[in-house]
Image: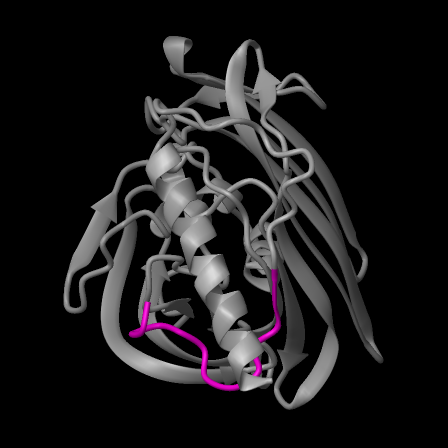
Amino acid sequence: MNRAGLLGAALVVLSGAGAAHGQAQVEAPDTSAVDPVDPRAARTPFGLGEHLVYRVKVGIFGVGYGHMTLDSQVDTVRGHRTYRATMGIEGRLTFASVDDEYQSWFDTRSLQTWRYIRDVHQINYKSLRHFEMYPERRRWERADNDEFGTLGSSLPLDDVSFIYFIRTLPLEVGKTYTLNRYFKDDGNPVVIRVVRRDQREVGAGTFNTIVVEPIIKTDGLFGEGGEAELHFTDDERRLLVYLKSDIPNFPGSLTLHLENIQEGLPLHPANRDRARARHAETAITTGQRR
């Protein structure tokens, strides 16, 4: 993961204890085209159709918007059922602009990545990289050129799927998770430190959060010394509501602020039932306040 890849990942990057206070913007899941439940799917806090919108700032200046989106239907890669996640960012300063899109196809059951496409447009830098993962051969290949390499894990994760995977962890304060799951060897191990609980006010409301510090063994925003923080809701949804990262050789920090939430519907039946019950309770509470 080089500097450009990390910048894009950071820009687009993801119960009573964690409920929002005030008028959080929460939309109902779109159930019009959601796949049926799958008892063999991984039990996840996220689901099909989840769409999170972010305001992006550098220092005190708003520079654009980003999003993290899961398609409302299951996709497939070489016969494997997958989520298709898209992260995007459009932003501009007087001297710089960013227009990036990342797509990850990761398994609905094992959560491992099968395909990862990165399309980066930053200032004077452009890069399109298309990775296909072949865990059975412990090999990744670039579809956009002839490059290939050895997978760093038999259950590989990319920049995007790693954020969703973190949301499935217990995230116990004071605990460190060391994961050899990045698809390239030079990114391993990924260290996830759960440092504290906090409260964060963003456009979508005020949330109790769990603060995580990710460290990836590469240069860039999440590299050692980058001092990145990810704030996830302190509830079963584990929504990424705030991200802060120092920008190397640049004054001020990059911050990402959750503005709008459209919840998704998980594939596992137990998780889907809880998501529907939670949304119904939120709708009742909102109606009572009105």
User: In this orientation, which residue lies closer to the viewer: 65 or 189?
Assistant: 65
At x 45%, y 77%, the residue is 20
| Number of marks present in the image shown | 0
Q: Position of residue 261 (x, y in %)?
A: 59, 63
Query: In this picture, which residue range is highlighted in magenta?
Result: 15-27
At x 54%, y 67%, the residue is 283
Looking at the rendering, in which quadrant would you find the C terminus? bottom right
Q: Position of residue 236 (x, y in %)?
A: 33, 58
| 261 to the left or right of 270 | right
Q: Position of residue 270 (x, y in %)?
A: 33, 38
| Above/below status of 151 relative to 3 | above
Colour mapping used in the image: one colour
Which residue is most to the left? 174
Magenta segment, principal secondary structure?
A: loop
User: In this orientation, which residue lies closer to the viewer: 158 or 186?
Assistant: 158
| 278 to the left or right of 86 | left
| Above/below status of 23 relative to 68 | below
Which residue is most to the bottom? 60
Q: Is residue 172 visible?
A: yes
Q: Position of residue 48 (x, y in %)?
A: 56, 40
User: In this orientation, which residue lies closer to the viewer: 280 or 97?
Assistant: 280
Give the quadrant of residue 268: top left
| Above/below status of 204 relative to 268 | below
The answer to if 61 sits in the magenta stretch is no
At x 51%, y 43%, the residue is 265
The answer to if 25 sits in the magenta stretch is yes
At x 65%, y 16%, the residue is 146
Q: Is residue 187 visible?
A: no
| 202 to the left or right of 194 | right
